Image (tube, rainbow, N blue to C red):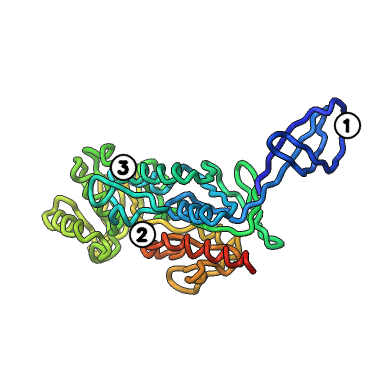
Amino acid sequence: MEEHFFLINLGKKSSFLFECHIRIAPLELSCTAEVLIGEWVIFKKMQEYDIVIIGAGPIGLACGIEAKKAGLRYLIIEKGCLVNSLYHYPLNMTFFSTSEKLEIGGVPFISHGSKPNRAEALEYYRRVASSWELQIKLYEKVESVTNGNGTFEIETSKRNYSSQALILALGFYDLPYLLNIPGEDLPKVRHYYDEPHPYFNQKIVVVGAANSAVDVALETYRKGAEVTMVIRESEIRESVKYWVRPDIENRIKEGTIKAYFNSEIKKIEQKVVEINTPEGPLLLDNDFVLAMTGYQPPFDFMKSLGIQFLDDEFHTPVYNDKTMESSVSNLYLAGVVCGGLKTNKWFIENSRVHAELIIETVKQKALH
């Protein structure tokens, strides 16, 4: 439920509680009233939700669409802007998937190329939210969730809500893996990348060997940066996009991008970085460190809700893959959060179905 407040002047001064029924067109309200200091009364009306969805990414929007189609009372809560994770992607990013695989809610996604870019995706999901007239609260962070008597009480940075069911459609872009080394807190160290221009004519170290690190290394190199990659593995990861992998391997082979394999960055200073290599420690002149080391789901928040996890290397949350219900009754998982640390398992294209599974389960439960 969401709290709505109404102030009415009673023309007298006192302090007491009473139950009342008032009509403020077009609403008829059964509510509790409390006289404040002076003559004003605050009336508080509670509105219950069948489902609250935390996260307004593509899968959160898909859940909202399915809930609306089913006639359920729903609300989507998002701590940032619409599709907040996509918004923070690099400005020139192109999706791995084709546009039709990113579609939700039956809204066509037309892009200029076969694979849409970030700007096209932001425009598309704005259009989806508008065309479906989805109920979304943006820039509202969930502070806590309590589960009692079969109802979820949700406290946010702005107000409180109550819901019979809860969907976590959380991304993982807010919690980067830290290097946990001296100097990581220097302003020159970045865990996020948006565009190459600031790194023109600068000596940069890119940490990582997956898609993000490779994209950053190639893009900054082509815009005039002197790029060095520091990679713990013995080679570029197999998961790197097939059309990009030959490019980075050839740049490393010809020496235009320097790479230290089986190596780790150990310390960051204002003008240099220290790395450990198979040949021994090495100091590199350096202006910026771009640590593209990946991101992780909000495990602490999930654990606070009582969600259980498998004892595996990916810390996979426990859920029923036919209903998407977690180990907590009426609490559902949707999208990338289902994979735990295996953040390359679930994407928009293969987790859109989670919305249908969840809403169908909620509907069936309501019938019994």
Q: Is residue 364 above or below residue 41?
A: below
Residue highlighted by disc 1: 14
Residue type beneath disc 3: Leu
Q: Position of residue 320 (x, y in %)?
A: 51, 71
Q: Are marks 3 and 2 in contact (CB under 8 Å)?
A: no
Residue 221 appears left or right of 77: left
How far apart are the alpha carbons under marks 1 and 2? Answer: 60 Å
Helix, strand or loop for disc 1: loop
Residue 102 appears left or right of 312: left
Q: Are marks 1 and 2 in contact (CB under 8 Å)?
A: no
Q: Earlier in the sequence, mark 1 or mark 2?
A: 1
Q: Is residue 319 above or below residue 145?
A: below
Q: Position of residue 97 (x, y in %)?
A: 29, 56
Residue type beneath disc 2: Glu
Residue type beneath disc 1: Ser
Residue 262 figure quarter? bottom left
Helix, strand or loop for disc 3: loop
Residue 313 appears left or right of 363: left
Crowding around mark 2 (Cα neighbors within 10 Å: few <14, some 14 to 19, many 20+) is some
Residue highlighted by disc 3: 91
How far apart are the alpha carbons under marks 3 and 1? Answer: 58 Å
Residue highlighted by disc 2: 349
Q: What residue sits 81% from the left and 33% below the top?
A: 36
Q: Position of residue 312 (x, y in %)?
A: 45, 73
Q: Earlier in the sequence, mark 3 or mark 2?
A: 3
In this rendering, the label closer to the viewer, 1 or 2: 2
In this rendering, the label closer to the viewer, 3 or 2: 2
